[in-house]
Image: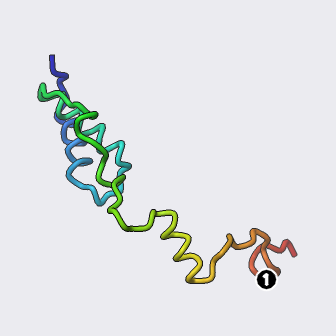
Amino acid sequence: MPETLTPDTRRALTGVIANPDLGFHPATTQNAWIMLKEARGQTVDLDRIGDPRHMIEREGTMSLTARILARASAIGRTRPDPLILRPGTGGDAA
């Protein structure tokens, strides 16, 4: 039997799915989509769907980690900035 959703819940879930630019985590979007499908009495077989698009990298492209490291090296950032505040930058107590 399909789960019934209140109009407010249905509207909130639809808002998550319809606005990907709001930056919701992909798992949040997936859960909202599944809840709406099940409320309509439709089944969801995640094994049949495959990997989410944000997890698929095109063949021949560098991995995200490799791209970040290459960009950091290109702009001269090979390690994090030191956490010690220099005098005159607001870290000195005097």
In-front residue for pair 51/3: 51
Image: 46 above or below 71? above
Image: 34 above or below 94? above
Which colour assignment does the render follow?
rainbow
In-front residue for pair 7/44: 44
Residue that appears at 21% across and 37% down: 8
Residue 9 sits in quarter: top left
Report x, y in % for residue 76: 62, 82
User: Which quarter of the image is occupied by the C terminus?
Assistant: bottom right
Which secondary structure, mark 1? loop
Residue 5 sits in quarter: top left
Residue that appears at 30% across and 48% down: 52
Report x, y in % for residue 78: 66, 75
In-front residue for pair 17/26: 26
Q: How many numbered discs, if any? A: 1
Q: Is residue 66 left or right of residue 28?
A: right
User: Which quarter of the image is occupied by the N terminus?
Assistant: top left
Residue that appears at 78% across and 74% down: 85
Farthest right residue? 94
Residue 86 sits in quarter: bottom right
Mark 1 Cα-neighbour bin, 10 Å: few <14, some 14–19, many ≥20: few
Residue that appears at 38% across and 49% down: 25
Q: Amino acid at mark 1?
A: Gly
Residue holding disc 1? 88
Farthest top residue? 1
Image: 89 above or below 46? below
Report x, y in % for residue 80: 68, 70
In-front residue for pair 40/94: 40
